[in-house]
Image (cartoon, helix red, strand yellow):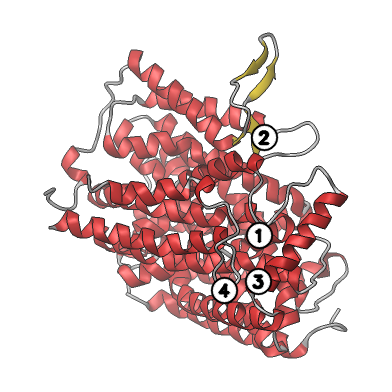
Amino acid sequence: MFDHLNVVATIVFVFFFALVTVLGFVASRWKAGDLGHIHEWGLGGRRFGPWVTWFLLGGDLYTAYTVIAIPAVVYAVGAYGFFAVPYTIIIYPFLYLTMPRLWTVSRKHGYMTAGDFILGRYGNRWLELAVALTGILATMPYIALQLVGMEKVILALGFTGQGMMQHAPLTVAFVILALYTYKSGLRAPAMIAFVKDAMIYIFIIAAVIVIPYELGGFGKIFAVAQAEFAARTAANPKLVAGVTLAPAQFAPYITLTLGSAMALFMYPHALTGTLAASSARAIRFNTMTLPAYSLALGLIALLGVMAIAAGVKVGTPQDAVPQLVLWAFPDWFSGFCFAAIALGALVPAAVMSIGAANTFTRNVWKAFIHPGMTPQEESVLAKLVSLLVKVGALLVIFYVPTRYALDLQLLGGIWMIQIFPAMIFGLFTRWFSGAALLIGWAAGMIVGTALSWGATAWTPVHPLSWDVPLIGHLDLGLGFAVYNGLTAVILNMIVSAALSLVWRSNAHDQTAPADYEDRVIA
Amino acid sequence: MKYLLLLIPTIVALAPALYNVVSPDLFGLPFFYWFQLLLIPISAVAIYAFDRLGRA
């Protein structure tokens, strides 16, 4: 089990892991509040200023899985994987225009989740339930993928095991995470994020200086990569790969970028991180400062081509970055980098489980089963649910092949985007009726899932032509493939708008236009 | 009009036809890569400018 262990790297790795474990428990005393109250446990009492929010959201959105998966796509097919960069560019103008409004109205009415806002705005508890279940469903495989990222680096440390023992280090790490999340709530990932983010930046800066130097510069790296992609596409004519996009990749690149950006801030963990800010101002500050992480992500993506140039050969592309790190750095720094990636899994996994737990507690259990819950009872339940969510994610890793976990996460994005119309249009207008949005949501969920469920393989993009039973061949004649989530959400919007025209809602709207404004408009 | 500050970087980011080329390169990095990386701080500065105009 330990025969091939890289001892130096493992010692460094364990040291940093122990350090953040201590921080995770100490965090319960930070910005002291009554953790028996759900606002304190699940939202840090909305006391995180601009900088804490920067670390928390940065650690929360730019996950370990991203650090592994984005360069993996670049390693496998080249330029297409770089969609992560425009994706993280277009998020922030959008964020600037929307999230301060959501924060302001949520502060005024005590909303903690997307479902809370939906109920207050549309007065429709079935839409609230739909939004809540979408978030929980999409979050589960996302947490599981954080574990995949962690397992990849533990594997790279040289740990080998038979049967269940193979997952032993991961299980230990996750039990520790579960315990301090249970105790400290959102304060734990916020505090750990300081360490994790600093480590990730050190890792990236070292990587983009040292590795190109060792490989003879970016010119050489890209020349080798270009030759490699040419060889791969010659060997497999179906593969589309290259250092720039092929014309057929344009539409998927654009729509995947747009769709991913629309989905991101619908996730419970993104909203939890945002609503925990202490002011709308703190959120605006972050729309200008979080792009620093996008820059890091773009540089991380380049590790994919560096791995090709370094001659890293791996069975699954997700192993490319860990193997590149081992190739490029001395053992102690490899251990440091692996610790950075593994801690990068802990922060989002903690926030995701808290976001899902808040959602389940308030929008499923309290709304439908036990309406008279006190905030103290909510806190007790949310803590328990956060444990259950993590056990569920561990079971997914034990029993579901990684391939499916990945598919489920992509499918999760397609589901998540379906609450976009209700959430974002709802920040600006009550013209849409709750029932219409619910039917639009259902249409989007069904169509998005159906489009993705290929006969042989699961595909995130689809040409806009279908053979529809009873109707025949339907072709929009655009001649390009579009991200399924975007196709589905456009249908969702059309259905919601058309039904809202004829089906007006007179349900109570808890919010007033002024509740959304945090400053006087010039 | 000031909304153009938010709109233009978004539209450019969503138009790979504008930057899907290898040259001119920067330190050996093809245009496709360094241009998109450069667009990140440009977009952040545009948001900052928009924010200042909003508060004025």
- SS class, disc 4: loop
Is circle 2 on the same chain as circle 4? no
- Check residue A283 in the rendering and tell me which mark sits there, or answer none: none
- SS class, disc 1: helix
Q: Quadrant of the N terminus of chain A?
A: bottom right
Q: Quadrant of residue A146?
A: bottom right
Q: Badge 4 is on which residue?
A: B27
* Residue type, numbered disc 1: Ala
* Residue type, numbered disc 3: Gly
Q: Badge 2 is on which residue?
A: A452
From this view, report whether residue B23 is shown above or below residue A344.
above
- SS class, disc 3: helix
Of residue A501 and residue A214, the one placed in the foreground of this image is: A214
Q: Badge 1 is on which residue?
A: A69
Question: Can see residue A177?
Answer: yes
Q: Badge 3 is on which residue?
A: A219
From this view, report whether residue A437 is shown above or below residue B51.
above
Residue occupying image coordinates x 58% and y 39%: A251
Name the spot of residue A242 as percent of width and height, x first.
Answer: 70, 54
- SS class, disc 2: helix
Name the spot of residue A468 as percent of width and height, x first.
Answer: 68, 16
The 10 Å Cα crowd at callout 2, few under 14, some 14 to 19, many 20 or more, is: many
* Residue type, numbered disc 2: Ser
* Residue type, numbered disc 4: Phe
Viewed as shown, does residue A300 lie left or right of A457? Answer: left
Residues under numbered marks 1 and 3 in contact, where contact means CB atoms less than 8 Å apart: no
The 10 Å Cα crowd at callout 3, few under 14, some 14 to 19, many 20 or more, is: some
Name the spot of residue A80 as percent of width and height, x first.
Answer: 63, 52
